[in-house]
Amino acid sequence: MRDVSFSLETGEIIGLFGRNGSGKSTLLKILFGNIKADAMTVSLNNQVLKISEVIPKQHIIYVPQHPFLPKTMKVRDVIIMFHPEEKEQDAVFYDSHIATMTHKKTGELSLGELKYFEVVLLSQLPHPFIMLDEPFSMLEPLHKEKLKERLFELKQTKGIIITDHYYNDVLDVATKNMVIKEGIGFPVISVEDLKEFEYLSR
Amino acid sequence: MNSRPYLQFYKAILPFVAAFALISAGFLGIVWGFVFFNSLALAFGFFGFHSFYKEQWYTYQNLGITKWQLFRSSLVINLIISIPVILFILISMIVGDFSLT
């Protein structure tokens, strides 16, 4: 990755595109502080942010592509572990889709159920930004729609970055988009632009 | 402070830590097994967690907990568990019916 820059505010969803190996996931991991970049600058409210502070100061949530919750824990125990305060617990417990699965272990949930649960669970955390790596992959249409609804609600309080090869789903929810090609980030608006940058075939 | 994530992490690494300490005790004696329980076994536990549950680091990191904080908390829990054993060894040594080998 050579030259990628963007800004993100509360109320915005950035759709991040790029072919396999273009560095989408790497970019997210760099922003989360799990991979070091040779050079980069991150600012939060016009203050330069130390990347080593992203995790301890809870600036950004990262929802990875693969399941990351302890598989042997029950959904209700995970909710309590993430949210010791009753108000945040209730916001997750009383979600109509999650209420039916609280007795199950996270390892017993379907991929769609788990992804939806992960997003709802993490969205109650205080971080101002959230990054989702391939949230639509392998989801059935019903779960996709639920997830999109949740993202629309979530952007009222957070800035969101989404990367996924299901470009139509991303374009549905994103307020602005970017494609990474040969290490450089380019703003894109439409499917035609994605073809222009050879992310899609003509 | 929310202690649940720290306890959950400790629960996840404990099988690795205990296995390392027990094997050490089997080969080198109970005291060395105990010493390793509070040192190398903990590092082995981290290695085991990283090898088998790598994605779960994100659970703790999204809660604002770094790997270093998890290491320190696990060390503290290990030491708390060890206090009764330390007392037992010290009392046994004073009384004189406990051998270090």
Image (cartoon, rainbow, N blue to C red):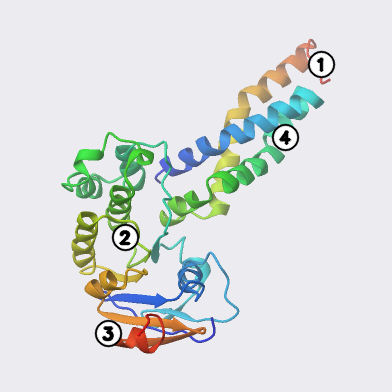
Position of B96 relative to A49 (above/below):
above
Q: Which amino acid, mark 3?
A: Ser
Q: Secondary structure at mark 2?
A: loop
Label 3 CA crowd tier, 10 Å (few <14, some 14–19, many 20+): few
Mark 1 or mark 4, which has the lower sequence index?
4
Q: Chain of mark 4?
A: B
Does B30 sit left or right of B76 as displayed? right
The residue that mark 2 highlights is A126
The residue that mark 3 highlights is A190
Q: Which amino acid, mark 1?
A: Ser
Pick the quarter of the image with the C terminus of chain A. bottom left
Q: Secondary structure at mark 3?
A: loop
Q: Residue at x 58, y 39 (%)?
A: B76
- Name the spot of residue A89 as percent of width and height, x first: 25, 46
Q: Chain of mark 2?
A: A
In whole angstroms, how far apart are the C-alphas of marks 1 and 3?
A: 77 Å
Question: Residue B38 occupies which quadrant of the picture?
Answer: top right
